[in-house]
Image (cartoon, helix red, strand yellow):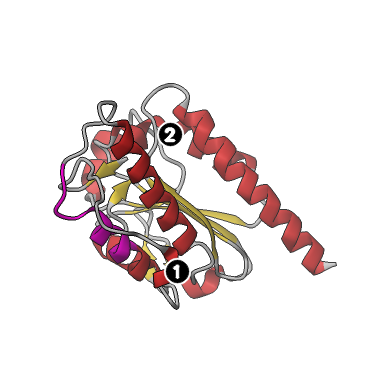
């Protein structure tokens, strides 16, 4: 995973979902930060214990954010489409936080685009948030790396709302407005596109089945 300003950190303080009480995405993110602040820098592949502890911290964050409410927001895409979170009820929503120089973000783009193609017409919405500017994305990045999500640029405020500090980060929201799955990080090899596709499609398919049962 990529962290802004931090490569990765090893926690020496506890991180437990049980301490949260009523969960929110920001609370989950803050607890994760507390678990990794002020400690030794993790050199991946050289400290297996550190890697294990970091993985546990990330898993606890995932457990914490799942079943939290989708934050309320209103944003405009680079295609001038307005997205209002309140209008997303009844839809499955896949949200990805990314940026152009994030190698794992770029590596998984083909898999994310495949999701968009395969779930057309199935009431699934795909949104990508990035802190970068529209011109850089449109003129420099998209010609070589198309990304078929509804892209919202200059979205640093969305990072704060969702408590995102790791890239890429993905959230899947159910039709009832709850976070049903979230994960951060990824690989940079050719397997990245398949990993993200399989992980996301499994959740989307399960939610579509739930929605169909409810509508009967």
Marks 2 and 1 in Cβ contact (< 8 Å): no
Q: Is residue 102 left or right of residue 18?
A: left
**How would you classify the magenta stretch by its main secondary structure?**
helix
The residue under label 2 is 108
Task: Indicate which label's residue lies in the foreground, 2 or 1.
Answer: 1
| Range of magenta residues | 29-40
The residue most toward the right is 216
Q: Is residue 39 rendered magenta in the image?
A: yes
Task: Using the image as rendered, state which of residue 177 and residue 67 is in the foreground.
Answer: 67
Quarter of the rendering containing residue 41: top left
Q: Residue at x 45, y 69 (%)?
A: 18
Crowd tier of the residue under label 1, counting other residues whose Cα lies within 10 Å: few below 14, some 14–19, many 20 or above: few
111 up-or-down from 57: above or below? above
The residue under label 1 is 18
The answer to whether residue 173 is seen in the rendering is: yes
Q: Secondary structure at mark 1?
A: helix
């Amino acid at each position: 995973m990529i962290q802004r300003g931090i490569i990765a950190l090893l926690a020496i303080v506890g991180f437990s979902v049980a301490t949260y009480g009523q969960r929110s995405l920001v609370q989950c993110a803050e607890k994760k930060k507390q678990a990794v602040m002020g400690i030794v820098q993790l050199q991946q592949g050289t400290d297996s214990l550190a890697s294990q502890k970091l993985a546990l911290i990330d898993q606890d964050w995932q457990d914490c954010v799942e079943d939290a409410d989708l934050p309320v927001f209103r944003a405009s895409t680079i295609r001038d489409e307005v997205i209002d979170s309140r209008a997303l009820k009844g839809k499955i929503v896949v949200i990805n936080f990314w940026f152009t120089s994030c190698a794992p973000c770029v590596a998984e783009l083909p898999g994310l685009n495949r999701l968009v193609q395969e779930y057309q017409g199935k009431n699934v919405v795909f949104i990508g948030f990035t802190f970068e500017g529209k011109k850089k994305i449109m003129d420099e990045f998209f010609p070589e790396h198309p990304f078929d999500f509804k892209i919202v640029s200059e979205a640093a405020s969305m990072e704060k709302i969702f408590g995102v500090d790791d890239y890429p980060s993905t959230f899947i929201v159910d039709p009832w407005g709850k976070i049903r799955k979230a994960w951060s990080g990824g690989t940079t090899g050719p397997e990245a596109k398949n990993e993200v596709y399989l992980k996301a499609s499994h959740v989307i398919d399960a939610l579509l089945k739930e929605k169909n049962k409810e509508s009967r």
